[in-house]
Image: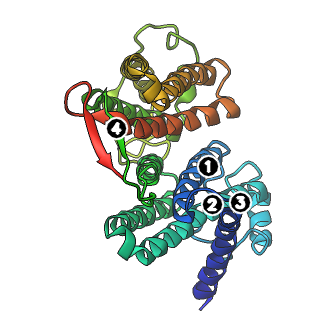
Amino acid sequence: MPNFVLFLELAAIAIVFAGLPLAYLWTRPGYSFFQKLNWVLVFMTFDLIVFGAFTRLTDSGLGCPDWPGCYGTSNPFHALGEIQQAESALPTGPVTVIKAWIEMIHRYLAMTVGALILVQVGMAFSKLKSLGKTPLFGSLGLLLLVCIQGAFGAWTVTLKLQPIIVTMHLMLALILLACLTTYAQHTWEGGSTSSHTLRIRPLPAGLLLTAFIVLSIQIFLGAWVSTNYAVLACPDFPTCLGSLWPETNWAEGFSLWRQLGLNAQGEFISPVALQTIHWAHRLFALVVLLVLGALGLKALQLTTPALSDLGRLAKLLLAILLLQVVTGISNVVFQWPLLAALLHTAGSAALVFCLVRMSYWASWGASIQQKMTKL
């Protein structure tokens, strides 16, 4: 029964949090409510990713060491006695009042995204006759993905921040962001007209796919650096401990299934393994710069007045790429400042968003393919 009450309280909190953006959307003119909801979900998921990074970077992931509540309650107010007792026993430990609130706010935001996707499913179902089955199936897929993401969020706590679980939690969040963006940029509800529009798809899909693959690998490496606390394993730049090629231990550094701070044998992970993790991320950044830079420049070359949106996205992509370089170097030179680390994670999510948006202009056909589409 207590668990049932806890879930009811958490559900009530999710409904209240989800009701705020829904009420705002209801008062805004313009696109259909369904289309606006889809874009709000993209915005909320981006915010959730950034706040998740803030939770991790402030060591608040175990601020409430149980799940889904906080010491069996729906909020830290009700668990204040237990939190203060844990904080008194270990003042610098993972449980403090502030960290508990940070962790629970992160969970509230995650529940809000889940609640909004449920609304999206309901609206897609209500529009089944007018829109067909595709948006409903897509929305159900998003609901399944957010449930899987929630499971990894639970395992993050119950498995005590195990690096591979935390890393996959971030990767799934970015996959969810990509899927939500793809769903939102589809015009499910468009006005019917007899006019024709000319859709030009000049961007090579092969280059875009390569960019997706390269960026995914780099995000995984970056998450692996962060979840293993290996950012300062190489405290200098561009060298690592004064060497252009530091000592490495790839087997230990990239042994995936192990506890935080330990290697696969259960011993403390070596400094060499940590600098290997860091060095891999730093080296692969060069590949990302080349591939995404080439994609951005190619898109700029193809930009015409009819493709002004693609040009704006290409400029945004190149600007974010530059920001990633600056914040990545700042994390090392300035000893992992919180702002630079947050911007670095936000930049990764923004790059994913840009690539998904640019996919609208990608074609596997000839360099310029024209397609007449009747709306």
Q: Most extreme residue toward the front, as rendered?
A: 194
Q: Gap between marks 3 and 4, in whole Å?
A: 50 Å
Residue 321's mark? Answer: none
The crowd level at tag 1 (other Cα within 10 Å; few <14, some 14-19, many 20+) is some
Residue 146 image offset from top left, x and y in percent? 45, 62
**Amino acid tagged 1:** Asp
Mark 3 — residue? 100
Q: Gap between marks 4 and 2, in whole Å?
A: 37 Å
Q: How many numbered circles does the render carry?
A: 4
Residue 44 image offset from top left, x and y in percent? 59, 54
Which residue sits at x=57%, y=47%? 46
Which residue sits at x=57%, y=26%? 232
Q: Is residue 213 left or right of residue 50?
A: left
Which residue sits at x=37%, y=53%? 194
Mark 1 — residue? 47
Q: Secondary structure at mark 3?
A: helix
Residue 199's mark? Answer: 4
